[in-house]
Image: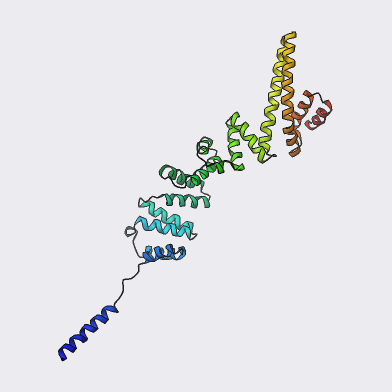
Amino acid sequence: MKIRSRYISIVSIVVMVGCSGPKPLTTLKDNAFNASTQGNYTLAVENWQKYFSQHSVEEIDADSYASAAQAAFLAGDSDMASKWYDEARYKNYASAEMYFTLAKIYHSQENISKELSALEFYTKNYNENQDEINNRLFEIYYEIEMYDKALVVWDKLNEPFKKQLSNQEKIFEISLKNENTEVSDSLSVTILEKDPKNVDALEWNAKKYYWNAENRYQEQMEKYNEHKTTKQYKILVNELDKVTADFKRALPYFQKLWGINPGKKYASYMANIYARLGDEKKSDFYKKYLN
């Protein structure tokens, strides 16, 4: 009985020791992941920093650096995020999330060159977030005057973005530089419906009708002076009706421009229009601004 009692006591001690023994420790890496899952990115970054400090670069895998970088970005530490993403890329890591985040980081740092590189790499390799990526690419291409690329991206943009006045103004400016009359005509009308005082759109229409009229006038007068026949005179009269119509179309646009910026810039146009329309008094009024 004594032997049996002693055996039971030993077994009991072993069981107790086993139950009270050390449990598996949660690693810093696990803590970092758990903190991120719970939305505590500051704590996640702290755990990643401790984890990295306890391991050599060779021991740390690319996924860990990428996860740490994303946590740092969400914690508001863009510099740390960029640094850790660089470590991940050095280990040949690449993902849509990484380049999407890097583009945002470079944008916040106003590093347009790196931002553009990240966005262009993204578009070539991933198919996520395309609307947001293309919208930003268009803005950058416009800003750095890479208009050919801006036009290519424009065709890929979503309609809500295209309908924004600021973006229509950008593509209108590009169309003017490229001398695309058809697009300029269409956009100028759309822009003026939203912003009746848009100077560029007003000037496009004002000068378009003005030069249509003036060039036709000069051409037909030259033809008549060369051949002063009855037939040519009838042609002249008919063409001058068209001239008058175009001058009258140009006039309201110039009147609005004059209201915005009265002075020499528009005075010669106004003076000439009124002279062609036979209103010498108004023509003389605008001529005073030419001195």
- The residue located at (44%, 66%) in the rendering is 43
Compared to residue 16, the image places residue 98 above or below, namely above
Q: Residue 219's x, y, as percent?
A: 69, 17
Q: Is residue 179 visible?
A: no
- Residue in the image at 79% along x and 24% along y: 275
* Residue 229 x %, y %: 74, 8
Left of 263 or right of it: where is 99?
left
Residue reaching furthest to the front:
1
- The colour scheme used here is rainbow
Quarter of the image that includes the C terminus: top right
Say left or right for 160 vs 15: right
Residue 176 sits in quarter:
top right
Residue 211 seen in the current view: yes
Q: Position of residue 144 (x, y in %)?
A: 54, 40
Q: Position of residue 269 (x, y in %)?
A: 74, 29
Q: Quadrant of the N terminus?
A: bottom left
Q: How many numbered marks appear?
A: 0
Question: Furthest-bottom residue in view?
Answer: 2
- Looking at the rendering, which quadrant does residue 72 occupy? bottom left
